[in-house]
Amino acid sequence: MELFDVYPLFDINPVKGEGCYIWDDKGTKYLDLYGGHAVISVGHSHPHYVDRIAKQVKKIGFYSNSVQNPMQVELATKLGELSGLPEFSLFLCNSGAEANENALKLASFHTGRSKVIAFEKGFHGRTSGAVAATDNAKIVSPFNSKHDIKILPLNDLSAVENQLKNNDVAAVIIEGIQGIAGIIVPDAAFLEALEPLCKKYGTVLILDEVQSGYGRSGKFFAFQHTSVTPDIITVAKGMANGFPVGGVLIAPHFKAVHGLLGTTFGGNYLACAASLAVLEIIESENLIENAKNMGEYLLSNLAKIPSIKELRGTGLMIGIEYDKNISLLRSKLLFEKSIFTGVSGTSTLRLLPPLSLSEAQVDHFMMCLCEASDSC
């Protein structure tokens, strides 16, 4: 049997990780400014993270959600405390797509409606409802397209209200920061007007913080740079530093009913141990403040490079847009300078490093970027 060949792969085989670095099987050391697609939040192989999971697996790794699991309660309590949303409830699942799928389902149950508003260039996952709400025709199959989704221009409040007036919209789903699109930050004024508009028409506001959450923006959630409080928040990528975990944070006005949502693997003991370790490290090492400071330091240095067309983002979620194809630049960074970055489209580098990134590592990246692009 062969693997189903859906991923274009770099000729690199990582075998070890530590902090913001990974090593391949040839011994090459790479600075990881991609974090495995914003997943590595507290750094590779953090000792406390490793210890937490190792100790847990020696006790019990899995049982279904038919029994009590006090670790789930501990995780919900800690997440509420650090996020500043102790009144919310938590539903645990396994991925960002699954979190968004359950959020959309919950909104539909809550309102009795089926229609959803999403936004251009948005990405919410690859499961049925989540991919239907994603603005990428290449990954939406005919089966997915049967969902009742209206995709509107980002920041266009009048277009949203025109749809909401029909009183048939279950949810508006929006990313705190659009990641796949190239780090596009919704206008704060738009978000702050969107919340009361949704309330006016009885529509659920879902903030997809799968990529932008967990401190990456310099706040626990990206929407917290505004005055908005959504009805539902979805999380995943940085939640457990690589262990498959997703979560749905649910405002108190939603009624929980047995059997309404469910999952086999979600919230298992190892997932909770990994997720708790991440929160403990974020708190003890002040990583959200570090993400804010290192993001500002990065952006201030990048702003000095004349060949950069536009800088977007906040914290350690940064898009660097050029007015040309950057595939060669990214290749030079990876294979000549041993630095991982992400990419959006053909012209934007994406930086999504661990939140523990240091000033010295930023300086090294800046030197390598200048050498690779011959533009400083």
Image (cartoon, rainbow, N blue to C red):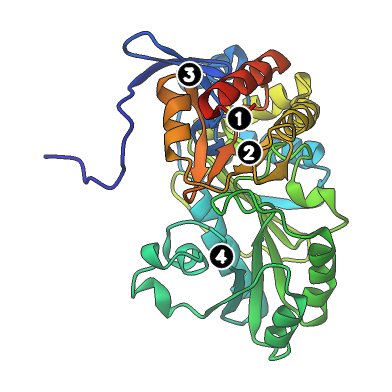
Q: Is residue 176 above or below residue 1?
A: below
* Residue 11 in sight: yes
Q: Residue furthest top?
A: 27
Crowding near pointer 4: few (<14 within 10 Å), some, many (20+)? Answer: few
How far apart are labels 1 and 4 at the CA level? 56 Å
Q: Nearer the viewer, mark 4 or mark 3?
A: 3
How far apart are labels 3 and 1 at the CA level? 16 Å
Q: Position of residue 40 (x, y in %)?
A: 56, 29
Q: Is residue 339 above or below residue 217?
A: above
The amino acid sitting under disc 1 is: Ser
Q: Nearer the viewer, residue 143 or 49?
A: 143
How far apart are labels 3 and 2 at the CA level? 19 Å
Q: Nearer the viewer, mark 3 or mark 1?
A: 1
Q: Residue furthest bottom?
A: 166
Circle on res. 337: 3
The amino acid sitting under disc 2 is: Ser
Tell me which numbered mark, 4 or 3, is placed earlier along the sequence: 4
Tell me which numbered mark, 2 or 1, is placed earlier along the sequence: 2
How far apart are labels 4 and 3 at the CA level? 50 Å
Crowding near pointer 1: few (<14 within 10 Å), some, many (20+)? Answer: few
In the rendered image, which residue does mark 2 sit on?
307
In which quadrant of the rendered view does residue 83 lie? Answer: top right
- Quadrant that contains the C terminus: top right
Q: Nearer the viewer, residue 44 or 77?
A: 44
Tag 3's secondary structure? loop
In the rendered image, which residue does mark 1 sit on?
375
